[in-house]
Amino acid sequence: MSKTMTLTLQIWRQRSADTPGSMQTYKLEGVNEHMSFLEMLDVLNAKLTKDGQDPVAFDHDCREGICGSCSMVIDGRPHGPRKGTTACQLHMRTYKDGDTITIEPWRAKAFPVIKDLVVDRGSFDRIVASGGFVSVNTGVTVDANATPIGKKNADEAMDYAACIGCGACVAACPNASAMLFTGAKVGHLVKLPQGQVERRGRVLRMVEQMDREGFGACTNHRECSEACPKEISFDAIELLNREYMRAQVTND
Amino acid sequence: MTDAKRPGRLSTLARSSIGAKIVMATTGVILVGFLVVHMLGNLQIYLGPDTMNHYAQTLKGTPALLWGVRAVLLVSLVLHVLAAVRLKGLNNAARPQAYAVPRRYRVTSSAARFMLLSGLVVLAFIVYHLLHFTVGATNPADFNLHEVLDVATQTWVRNDNEQLIAKLPPELVRHDVYSMFVRGFQNPLIAGTYIVAQLLLAMHLSHAVASMLHTLGLSKGTAERERNINIGRAVAAVIVLGNLSFPIAVQAGLVHL
Amino acid sequence: MDLNAKIPDGPIEGKWDRHRFEMKLVNPANKRKYNILVVGTGLAGASAAASLAELGYNVDCFCFQDSPRRAHSIAAQGGINAAKNYQNDGDSIYRLFYDTVKGGDFRAREANVYRLAQISVNIIDQCVAQGVPFAREYGGLLSNRSFGGAQVSRTFYARGQTGQQLLLGAYQALERQIGLGKVKMYARHEMLDLVVIDGVARGIITRNLVTGETRGWVGDAVVLATGGYGNVFYLSTNAKGSNVTASYRAHKRGAGFANPCFTQIHPTCIPVSGDYQSKLTLMSESLRNDGRVWVPKQKGDVRRPEQIPEDERDYYLERRYPSFGNLVPRDVASRAAKAVCDEGRGVGPSKMAVFLDFGDAVRRLGQNVVADRYGNLFEMYERITGEDPYKTPMRIFPAVHYTMGGLWVDYNLMSTIPGLHVLGEANFSDHGANRLGASALMQGLADGYFIIPYTIGNYLAQAKLPKITVDHPEVQRSLAGVRAQTSRLLGIKGRTTVDEFHRELGLVMWDYCGMGRTAEGLKVALQKIPEIRARFWSDVAVPGANEELNPWLEKAGRVADFLEFGELMCLDALERNESCGGHFREEFQTPDGEALRDDANYSYAAVWEYTGEGSAPRLNKEPLEFKNVKLATRSYA
């Protein structure tokens, strides 16, 4: 039979963007070891609702580790202790009876807190809008197999494209830098022939937008790739640096 | 998007965060290169006063090279510090509200996290070191030591007669760097200061060299990156072990007047 | 209700070409004078918004997620079908068309399906040009795999993340238009009503989920791409936010809802582990290639699976369907699992699961080969259940996965309300009563990239649309209605949480309108649902206020709609006295327990018309004609 446990939760509570927040302590009993972390929060919220208290707001949607919605720092680590695992796929059997768990939102100027654990990640969208695409309109008539792409390049492009845009890299970075995210998109497109035409302008514009959003600069701590639930390699950042330098000395 | 929206070349580099990182890394390459040469040059202390003083004399005898190098180093150092301050400013601003709970890091090192601190200590040390050994402001008695060339025997002999030295033609006088060096490090306080500074330099370099390689995008793949991290630590170790040996050797009496 | 599907004349192969020629065009310079509201940013919505903006239309685009990239299309794993015939294995547009109509158990509109098969090839070209990193062979050409219900390899894929990669392609195209200013994107905005003026869809009402501001938007056409309603069952593989609200509120404004009872139950999901369960996770269908499905022969056998000897195991799929074995289609596999669990032979703590055993595969192929094929899936299973499938059999159970029903649309993807276009899973679509694997992505992108950009122009070129603003009384009336509902929800201050009501509804739906349905059961459900609904409106606890981020208020609104919609589903299931595809009425089966279709009486799309609160919905019928495909019984024995 499954075990249950009693936990002490310390959770960041903040009513809105412009009110100050603080850590609040909650005791939660009867947590089943097979629950997911978010289901544990559901149970807490049901309890808070019944007690007439304000439940904890957190972003979530697919709950299977692909949509990138969930975004919480658990015990000092984005998405919690398990490598390559989003908070929604973390299960309570990772914890034991009597544990204290701290939960707070991503912290970065470019990810302002909206409420409790919910942050605004629109900055990521704007980085993509600045150049993270191939400029083709609908209606392409070139056959998909007209340009062969070596398996190695296709696989590497896929490795970078696996990013779910959750922002754990920014949350993990001591500098709140978004270079892993930006590098992953640049890397995805630069590995493919379709991405070559706009190669130079893309990296310049995306980096410019990244800076404008107020993200920090990478100082090579490599915490981002360690925290990434999709295990995007730190190569993305070295690639971004190379592409940026290349863009300084080439023309399209 | 249109070309009009495309930013100009130098202005983007100057304004961008990656630009600052590139400045950091390229000036870092120059500074680390200097540190290696500086340490290798000083190893001549173990070959005795004549070799050491001859080395110093040669450097002084080629002022174009000496001042050229000094200019490059000064510019590099200034840019390096400015870029560091700028990046630190950006990075502090990027997280105005700190985490309420201490972070649990997975791979980064204290060296990486306290780069600015170790850098500032090293900077202060550089200033002191220049005042001590290059300008001679802190210990003038050690600094104003000379050798004169005994024309008969063609050997260099220590001479403390300042009035005489002032009269001799420059080719017959040279700075007694060896004695300055040894006398400096015989003072336990100075030796201790150098040792502490070198330990902080070690900390700084242990992240700096690898970081420089990452910023220049020189590793492709985890294996290469691990290798570069190890190279970085090895370079830091070699420089600092060499430098540390000097005060220790003097204190231990292995190198003496 | 006018159910003229406006199918072009002529042979099926030429209908779409002919239609494209006959449709009216909007002059390029005039396109910028039109404003189109696109709701939803999944494959269909994002591709539509981007393509319409590229043509020059002004687009306002809305999604309730925090970013358009998070729409639930992102979670599709397997792949996307296209009749490219790159494998030279005999595929063709006609074969894809045929497989889809047959797979849908002959309840789809032929002309639409044919067009879908034609367009499928363009989708792959488009996506590759956008930089979608499809899997490739060593020679650099695109790789394909085979999928259920087809005998050719026509499925394109990007690892197990095909939906994600296709969505990112569409999202990037959308972001490009946002950057160019042609699309204005409103994330964290939920559509809460459709504005119909003089019988024409002219706008929507949204709630800003951050500030709580409700406001009206007007435009020249509205495009709904708001996905499916699987969450009416509470537990499904859908994202937590997926809901029927946009579709249902359009339905209440006059859009016919077609075949609501057609739902797809996917056989290989991780079983429910407890009451706290919030959603179900799909394990790729590909596992059935090497895994063997079994339950103990004896009821109540509580031994660990490895202690049960071979001759006391019932490999029921292999026994019942010797030629297809473990690879029978989704609906068949799901029903068989339910049957053995109903007999009391289910396994695991809940007894609502069957084993999917890789023991033989590991012995035959070695652990390395198995790891190579399924390693990531095994890891996911281990992460969720804490059990190692290399050592002990997986436990699986069917779960709601996709809904074939949706708002009725004609050949132009326009609903029964002029100006309201519906794309993707939200429309009643091309999948009939059962969707084949890897066809949902194809349909979403076909609708968004290649159909709506043409047909919306045809509509706009002919529609006479007076200029209106958000001050129009009809907009204000809708706005007032939405605000009243919000206040009402917040004012109840009851004791039961939204989730508790949702769970209760879900259980009723699953028990009576799930994998097996009976007239008797459906009647029970039709009694229970209004009862739950009445309790909901008197006892729901919605904490917080309107003027803030309030996920519980959002959820309450969605559950309120599910509580009405569930009833419509049951009605539809009760009305359809036959079994077809995902709709299995236990009274209508062959002696071997297979679905028994009634083509003479039920070869139609059931289109429901809203007739007001408390009044029974009216059933309209669009007869389905099969001129190109011969009606046949599906057999997998």
Image (cartoon, rainbow, N blue to C red):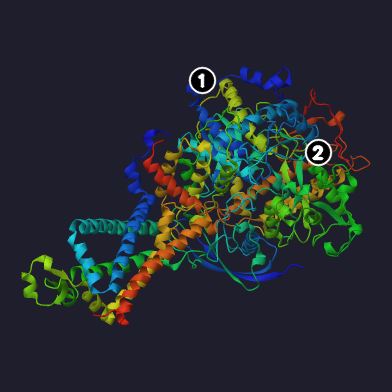
Q: Position of residue C301 (x, y in %)?
A: 88, 62
Q: Position of residue A147 (x, y in %)?
A: 57, 33
Q: Which residue is mark 1?
A: C27
Side of C316 relative to C94 (left or right): right
Judge by depth and name the residue closer to the eye, B126 or C50.
Answer: B126
Spatial CA distance of label 1 from label 2 is 44 Å
Side of C550 relative to A31 (left or right): left
Q: Which mark is residue A179?
A: none
- First of labels 1, 2 by sequence position: 1
Q: Which mark is residue C581?
A: 2
User: Circle 2 — which element?
Assistant: loop
Q: Quadrant of residue C8?
A: top right
Side of A15 relative to B136 (left or right): right
Vertical position of residue C110 compared to residue C426: above or below: above
Judge by depth and name the residue closer to the eye, C387 or C197.
Answer: C387
Q: Position of residue B67 (x, y in %)?
A: 20, 58
What crowding class fits label 2: few (fewer than 14 Cα within 10 Å), some (14-19), or many (20 or more)?
many
